[in-house]
Image (tube, rainbow, N blue to C red):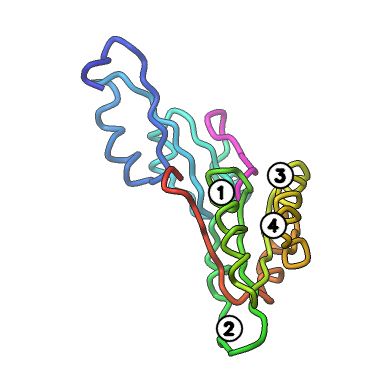
Amino acid sequence: LANNRNKVNLIFLSKSSHVNLLSRFKKFFNFKIIFENHQDKAFVKAIKSSDLTYVVSPQVYEKVKDKKVILWNYHYPVREDLFKIRKTFKTKDQYTLGYVGSLNPEKGLDILLKSLQSLKNFRLKIIGGNEKQISRFKLLAKNHHLENRIIFTGFLPQGKIANALKEVDILVAPFKRTQ
């Protein structure tokens, strides 16, 4: 930033504490902060300190909406009720792996599909993705002879995810190192 003081620099942040800290130096280093709030909490101080905020939670948007706050309903917001699901892990003939999120290449699902070939007593439930992404993965699954072991739900509203996870034994996030 010091080397680019004569330019307007944009900093993208997803942690409110980082926004609060760096906002003190905006004028000195000539940068603007774009805050992407991925949670169901309204970080009011960070939202006020940023130059533009994207929120993924409609509830947060309703609390803080103004001209510099945009509701971006592409992601699922992190909600604590999703973590309250408790299952007793039991030995069984077939286990279900679960994935929740977008099907973008950097998410590592292609690696997960390849791994599934050697995990004979596992199937995979993928929650998320649009029709084009799902079609691509269905073709990959067919090429790996896994089409009967993968369940695609497509995008689900936040309120339906917990129910869709009931049959999942292990939730995975196979992100690539660049994610």
Q: In which quarter of the image is residue 124?
A: bottom right
Does the residue at mark 3 contact the one at mark 2 (Cβ under 8 Å)?
A: no
> Which element is circle 1 on?
helix
The residue carrying pointer 1 sits among few (fewer than 14), some (14 to 19) or many (20 or more) residues within 10 Å by Cα, namely: some
Q: Quadrant of residue 10?
A: top left
**Three-letter amino acid code of the residue under disc 4:** His
The residue at which mark 3 appears reads as 133
The residue at which mark 2 appears reads as 87
Q: Is residue 105 magenta?
A: no
Q: What stretch is highlighted in magenta?
A: 66-77
For marks 3 and 2 on the same chain, the one whose residue lies earlier in the sequence: 2
Does the residue at mark 3 contact the one at mark 4 (Cβ under 8 Å)?
A: no
Nearer-the-camera pick, 14 or 51: 14
Of the 4 image quadrants, the one containing the N terminus is: top left
Residue found at x 43% / y 43%: 178
> Which element is circle 4 on?
loop
Q: Which of marks 4 and 1 is in front?
A: 4
Residue found at x 44% / y 39%: 47
For marks 4 and 1 on the same chain, the one whose residue lies earlier in the sequence: 1
The span from disc 2 to disc 1 (Cα, nearest Å) is 30 Å
The span from disc 1 to disc 3 (Cα, nearest Å) is 29 Å
**Three-letter amino acid code of the residue under disc 1:** Val
For marks 4 and 2 on the same chain, the one whose residue lies earlier in the sequence: 2
Q: Which of marks 1 and 3 is in front?
A: 3
